[in-house]
Amino acid sequence: MSLTSLRGRYRGGVTLPIAETLVHYADGALTSDGTVVHVGSTQDGRLAAVLDTTAAHPVDAAWPDQGADRGTLEIGGRSIHLDDCVVGATDGDAVFYGADVPVKKGTEGWTFFVAHIVSPDEQVSVGDAVRVTIDEGYRVAVSAGHTGCHLASLALNLALAPGWSKEVMVDAAGSPNFDALAIDSSTITEFASVDVYRLGKSLRRKGFAPASLVDDLTAVQESINATLGEWAASDAAIRIEHEDNLLTGRRYWLAELPSGTVSIPCGGTHLTSLAQAAAIAVSLTVGDDNGTPTVRMETVVTPA
């Protein structure tokens, strides 16, 4: 694709990106060389630089479980601190960043891109050549947290399988998908994640007995950790599969677990092997959200 086709079109004197950002973080890239195709301003007055291609992982406001990469942009010998990195979108007439994007990623008629957020004092112009460099230590730490989050959800689903009285959707390993049906929030951090589940009436109508979790919390936790211990010891290979590098392209996390290979749609970053994890363990606590029982699962990954 030529640079000319990527530079944008004008609407009211504003250069709008017309091609979707190509992303390389799923392949583990820590650097990329791209070109600025749009420069805008966020609601809080910071500068948003859109590149045609990037190694930086952005946070998606629609499901912000994994946050933005940390790193720098190098332009003309200047190193610029990357304050944030978000998914943005345009309908051809206006540009939106982060939480201001009014549609879901992939909506027809919209172009989605990665916006690199920097200080408003920086000088960035359309056509600038940019090298993106990602903080490797932070990337690895968050990738470990994301991998642990997936594995913990699978182990949780397996431990809770006897608590279902009706057939429901299953997860990648064939267990009733409690995680998908009960999840309220998910937050991925360095070598850790926190998932909160609501045990409301809709879940009970689907056939889940909350008592099988709440009343047997210690036993469920022990079951999850036994499974995670087996998986961590397996040194299972992990990879991301995808057909293209478009920001909105479908990507799948695959882990070759002892019981078989599992595949989960995921746009985040991950470890490449469980040999990178010395241990993975969860702790469960019961809470309450305005009268509705909740369970908090904290997952911790100990690096090898």
Image (cartoon, rainbow, N blue to C red):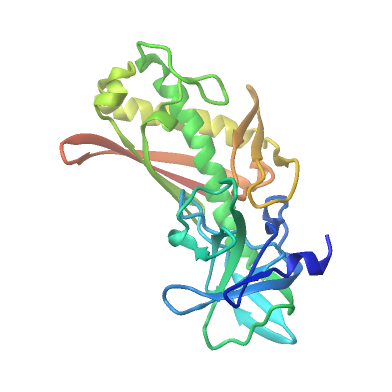
Task: Looking at this view, name the residue that lies furthest to the right.
Answer: 2
Q: Is residue 82 above or below residue 274?
A: below
Q: Where does residue 186 sit, x and y in percent of width and height?
A: 42, 46
Q: Is residue 77 above or below residue 137?
A: below
| Residue 209 in view of the camera | no
Rendered residue at 75%/41% (across/down): 243
Where does the image place residue 191, in percent across and percent down from the top left?
51, 53
- On the image, the x and y values in percent for residue 202 come to 29, 25
Question: Quick one: quadrant of the N terminus?
Answer: bottom right
Lateral position of residue 3 relative to residue 140, left or right: right
Residue 19, compared with residue 270, is above or below; it is below
Image-quadrant location for residue 141: bottom right
Q: Nearer the viewer, residue 304 or 192?
A: 192
**Residue 38 appears in view:** yes
The image shows a total of numbered marks equal to 0
Up-down relation of residue 123 to residue 166 (above or below): below
Q: Nearer the viewer, residue 164 or 47?
A: 47
Which is more toward the observer, 59 or 208? 59
Residue at horizontal 72 percent and vertical 41 percent from the top: 242
Give the quadrant of residue 272: top right
- On the rendered structure, is 256 left or right of 218? right
Query: In the current view of this chain or complex, which residue is farthest to the left?
Result: 291
Q: Residue at x 73, y 75 (%)?
A: 130
Q: Quadrant of residue 254?
A: top right
Q: Residue at x 27, y 36 (%)?
A: 294
- Which of the pair 217/153 is nearer the observer? 153
Residue 211 coordinates in the image, percent (x, y): 25, 22
Q: Is residue 134 left or right of residue 67?
A: right
